[in-house]
Image (cartoon, grey):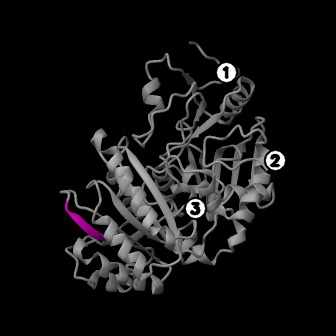
Amino acid sequence: MVATIEAFRGQIITADDPGYDAARSVWNGMIDKRPALIAHCLDTADVVAAVKHAAAAGLGVAIRGGGHNAAGLAVADGALVIDLTRMRNVTVDPVSRTARAEGGANWGDFDRATAAHGLGTTGGAISSTGIGGLTLGGGLGWLMRSYGLACDNMIAAELVTADGSVVHASDTENPELLWGLRGGGGNFGVVTSFTFKLHPVSTVLAGLLVHPIERAREALHFYRDFTASAPDAVTAFATLTASPEGMPIFAFLACYNGPTAEGEIALKPLREFGPPLADEIAEMPYTTLQTTLDNEFPHGLPVYWRSHFAPSLNDDLIDILATEFATVASPLSQILIENAGGAVSRIDPEATAFDHRHSPYNLAFISRWTDPAAADRNIEWTRKAWSAAEPHARGVYVNYLGVGENQDRVRAAYGPAKYDRLSALKRQYDPTNLFRFNQNITPK
């Protein structure tokens, strides 16, 4: 089959092309979707042409940015995939401390460009994460307690809407759309560029602290107390995971964003707890920290993911996390606890579509495996652990919604009032739900 799109300059791939299987492959190895067309766009004009073609042909649109997604939403059966991975340019204005990034850039692209000027912004914790998906869903990251979420630092965007219009969103132009883009996901169009405010970022004091898994409960009690009083410059995560040799371990991952001497004081209690089996905390460029976990999340492994926000790490929840991890089905799986708070919690909850700012902990139950025969066992472990923690949860992070989660879970990411407001925006910009292969908000 030969496919053409009028006025399209990029590359179009169909199932008849030798590169089709590679082009439809995504980070999560569980996902095996067969789109009708894959349109590798070179610029905004290509995106306009692709959107108009999809609408005329009756094809739904899936949007592929520059990174990965636990639910594999970048591809869909029978859809037209708008692939932005060739649109990766990042332009920095060091005077205004802003950066404009195209929709296919990842945080590695962004950080390299901004670090050249001693600047940066909140951008996840893995360099291969795409700026688009992370920002549109909220954007947790190492710098969030200092500067807020990625979406809080997005000050403008250009997007192509369902009728092929190019629309700009900022505080002065379509401000309600900007509100929705700050957490509402890819529901309103294809974002072809993002503009972020930047902050002074250079070196950080950061790294891993490893403890025996037998101390997990004690470590989580300590972590609860430590994060309750840590300064904004500290972002600390905790994980029940396995060493490279497959040995179950408990670990802290910590970052101090500021002068090293102050960081040594702030992280001293964390480093003295235990003491740890290994202390890898060191001064490093922020760009180095952003790549530290890249190899832990490689492309192509099957991944099954469930998540909760939690308002606290109470004693019962701590016991549940330790108990459930003891039955983990794969050494590649983990329970991850991320701590927000700080600047994230001080932003007006109504200022963005992102919700749950006053739930400082995000729990992720992540299964990965290599043996196809082990899929059911690993999925069952994730569901069981996630269900056990649910009585202590409050909502969910939209970026961590996993494979097969339903509309009730999407609503739980926003709450009723925000969901209704987002649904009205969806009606305005995408009344036929052309952009439906996402954590979908239905038109009101």
> In this rendering, is residue 186 above or below 205?
above
Q: Report the front residue among 2 and 316.
A: 316
Query: Which range of residues does the magenta coloring cover?
Result: 247-252
Question: What whole-number distance in Å separates the C-alpha atoms at marks 2 and 3?
Answer: 25 Å
**In the image, is residue 249 part of the stretch drawn in magenta?**
yes
- Asked whether the residues under the numbered discs 2 and 3 touch, taking CB atoms below 8 Å apart as contact, a structural biologist would say no
The residue identified by callout 3 is: 150
* Mark 1 Cα-neighbour bin, 10 Å: few <14, some 14–19, many ≥20: some
Question: Which callout, 2 or 3, points at the residue further toward the start of the chain?
Answer: 3
Question: What whole-number distance in Å separates the C-alpha atoms at marks 1 and 2?
Answer: 26 Å
Q: Report the front residue among 148 and 261.
A: 148
The residue identified by callout 2 is: 428
The residue identified by callout 1 is: 5
Amino acid type assigned to the residue bearing label 3 in the image = Ala
**In the image, is residue 72 part of the stretch drawn in magenta?**
no
Predominant SS of the magenta segment:
strand
